[in-house]
Amino acid sequence: MGADSPLRRRLLKSMLAASGGLALPLVQAAPSAAPILTRPIPSSGEHIPVIGLGSWITFNVGRDPQARTECAEVMRQFFAGGGRMLDSSPMYGSAQDVIGEALQAIKPARLFSADKVWISGGARGVQQIETSRRLWRVPRFDLLQVHNLLSWEEHLTTLLAMKKEGRLRYVGITTSEGRRHGEIEKIMASQPIDFVQVSYNALDREVEQRILPLARERRIGVIVNRPFRQGDLTQALAGKPLPGWAAEIGCTTWAQALLKFIVSHPAVTCAIPATSSVAHVRENLLAGTGRMPDDALRKRIAQDVGRLA
Amino acid sequence: MSEWWTYSLSDFLMFSSRSYYRLIASYNEAVWPAHLLAVAAGMLVIGCIIRPQRRTYRIAAVALALSWAWVAWAYHLQRYADINTAAPYFAAAFALQAVLLCFVALRPRATPPSGARQLVALGIAAVAVAGYPLLALASDRGWAQAEVFGIAPDPTIAATLAVLLAWRAHWHLWLIPVAWCAASGATLMALRVDFAWLLPAVAIFVVAAGLFFRRSKQAL
């Protein structure tokens, strides 16, 4: 029997199933075995996994070789576990270069590269995009977003032209922490964008009122940043016992419950939690598998998180 | 920046405390044994405060100018810029302060009187040179991440404030050091590290002491 033969895998699965709770650490220690749920990008129908990987703060490690190796390992586990969307920005310090170096080493079979343009002025934006592409070491980006709406009219013109010429697949805009939602709505209603990136979590739910319904109506994909409020939410919930509903949807940690809350919203395409921990990236990927909460349970999750955090 | 009131300190933070202190550790490793020279320069600055003369002010100003220039180049430009996009601007401000201190060295002020002002300055300089490296140990970070006068910005700024206080320096020499105290304090507070309050507290204390001694002198 080979080391990874089908019979051996079936036997192992049976043993794990029979051991009940003991199986959980083993399942968590390996890249996600169950397939990650995917969602179609509304404008194209292309499916992408509901869990992506952000790089704000976590991948800005400068030239530190050990930290770069750790980031590369996080990315390796992310791809091995079925993840595809990596998100970064020129605003994130050395993160783009850290990603590029790791991509060169890993050579993932399926990458969805999402970056941003963040500079005043259209002409400088073109230059910045090329610099970012070189740092990522990719032939082209899948998605480019206007970061925090900086010089958005000029950059959107550039990005849409790039898409038309086949040098870019998708175009988007971003904001975070509830800023400039009025302007975001206007752009969503008037411009042919493919994605909008916003902050959304069990406590910050303003986007449920207008932006998420508008995204569905306009067939715009939604990428969710800051799913844990930059770690504050998971920190606030640390040590608090998971309510009974967590087991119903296969959650063993608060982070998974928070992610399931987000990606189970029908308008959300994917969430992009950032982490520099291999254990956390595995945990996050597991949140994209198994049963998702229905409307009633989502309300309950929000209530419980609001009460406990 | 629109909706500026919605931003908090953490919104401007682009790196983790781990990355920050690992950067300091790798910087320390790269420039060692420059620390020995830097500590000697720090001791020299303390000696200058103990013997306040026009000549010692010149010596202190030269030692500080060299420290500011080194920190601008070796720390801000060569290393901090890797994780903080604002670091080149910090480097420019530090270089400017080095130039201002060179002007001080060329035309030092008259000998200040000894007394309480001198003692306060001495205490702050001792904190900068001897106390700052110990913070790493007190925070369980170890010697590798110690911040040393003349090598790291914060103790260099604290010692500079001590010299400015001792010699009743012109107000324009205070601007950059005090601004850095605010910037560094805000960064460390956002990183939620131990002793983040120290440098802003030093700045407030030294400025308050300077104003107090000035008013006391006017009252006399």
Image (cartoon, coloured by chain):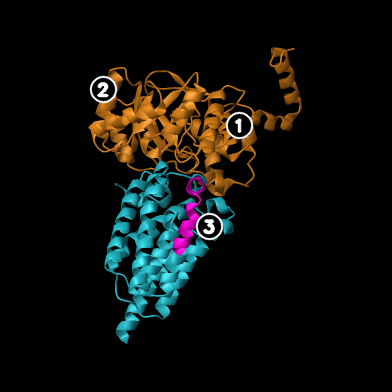
Query: In this structure image, what is the colour of chain B?
Result: cyan
Crowd class of label 2 (few under 14; some 14 to 19; many from 20; radius 10 Å): few
Q: Give the residue type that dot 3 points to.
A: Asp
User: Mark 3 touching mark 1, by CB under 8 A?
Assistant: no
Q: Chain of mark 2?
A: A
- The secondary structure type at the circle numbered 1 is loop
Q: Which residue is mark 2?
A: A161
Residue A1 as seen in the image, left or right of residue A283: right
Q: Which mark is residue A249?
A: 1
Q: Which mark is residue B194?
A: 3
Q: Is residue B37 magenta?
A: yes
A275 or B161: nearer the viewer: B161
Q: Chain of mark 1?
A: A
Compared to B28, does A17 lie above or below? above
Crowd class of label 1 (few under 14; some 14 to 19; many from 20; radius 10 Å): some
Q: Quadrant of residue A243?
A: top right
Crowd class of label 3 (few under 14; some 14 to 19; many from 20; radius 10 Å): some
